[in-house]
Image (tube, rainbow, N blue to C red):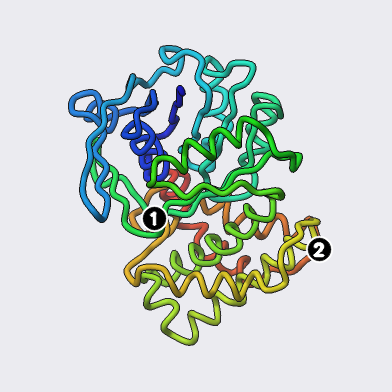
Amino acid sequence: MRFAVVGVGGAGGYFGATLAAAGHEVALVARGEHLAAIRRAGLELERPDGTITIEPSIATDDPREVGVVDYVFLGVKAWQVTEAARAAAPMIGPATAVIPLQNGVEAAEQISAVLGREHAVGATTRIISLIAGPGRIKHVGVEPTLELGELDGSRSARLTELDAVLSATGRIKSVLSADVRVAIWTKFLFITSWSGVGAVVRLPVGVIRGVPQTRALVEVAMQEIARVAVAHGIRLPHDAPSMAMSYLDTMPAQGTTSMQRDVVEGRPSEMEHLTGAAVRFGKVAGIPTPTHCFIYQALVPHELRARGERP
């Protein structure tokens, strides 16, 4: 089976390396020093139980060199999805499925707009992993999980096949969803609230959940998104916020989100596609989101500076 990973970051790198280690043909589309290191010495994946190094079938910055594949994993940042989908076009055949690994709720529709709805898959991931250096991915914590579903709710042969392949690696928990939008919004509720509060207070999750004031802030943020989701027709369980808080309590105490790390380290972040999206979707539905509005307004100056739009 042929796979391609566009954007070999924490999630994309983990899934790509794991599939390659299981014997599948995996092409990695990366750039810069990361690409140079992969070409020179392969992609290193550091896991809690040891480190592996895989040789991709090809490592390139040009998707045209890859050819048509069965599945494309988009591991780029949320603001790069449209551009990455356009770039991936030479790898798309009649039956190719494109799986977004981004946080947020808009990626599948963006892929549909560029490549056609027949190629877009709904997906959401659970993993804490990051680029530890050029050519190096580090899995920090959380059982790597990929929840998948067709956008129309059907049970397809292509996702049944992918589910079996992912599960067979023994390193990825794969879940097929009959309503993947619920799964996507459940993750959005969780990661947006944690990311926003974490980016403002700049402390790891163990501190955030352990201090009553910041714990309450995360809880309120989750409740706001739950109301927004229901207003948009998402059949979110009524206890989604409390379940998300319970899941937050299982995170490694030193855990941080990618958005939080990007904000703290002065890099462009996914703020517009997480906190900003919560505010936008709330306005469309007429649902107030004062907590997310505050977080968004507090982070805008940092985002503008990171993108070079303000001194």
Residue type at mark 2: give it.
Gly
For the point 79% across and 56% down, the residue is: 232
Q: Is residue 104 above or below residue 36?
A: below
- Could you tell me if residue 32 is visible in this image? yes
Query: Residue visible at 39% across and 40% down?
Result: 169
User: Among all residues in the image, which is located at the extreme bottom?
Assistant: 212
Left or right side of 263 for 146: right
Determine whether 264 is above or below 214 in the image. above
Which residue corresponds to mark 2? 286
Q: Answer with left or right where residue 238 lies relative to residue 9.
A: right
| Cα–Cα gap, marks 1 and 2 | 33 Å
Count of numbered tags = 2
Which quadrant of the figure has residue 118?
Answer: top right
Disc ID at residue 128: 1
Q: Secondary structure at mark 2?
A: loop
Q: Position of residue 297 (x, y in %)?
A: 57, 63
Q: Residue furthest left?
A: 41
How packed is label 2: few (under 14 Cα within 10 Å), some, or many (20 or more)? Answer: few
The image quarter containing residue 236 is bottom right
- List x then y, in percent, for residue 122: 63, 42
- In the image, taking residue 123 as reference, residue 1 lies left or right, namely left
Judge depth for marks 1 and 2 and give the one in front: 1
Report the disc number at residue 304. Answer: none
- 180, 257: nearer the viewer: 180
- Front position in the image: 20 or 164: 164
The quarter of the picture where residue 254 lies is bottom left
Residue ID at (58%, 58%):
187
Q: Position of residue 128 (x, y in %)?
A: 39, 55
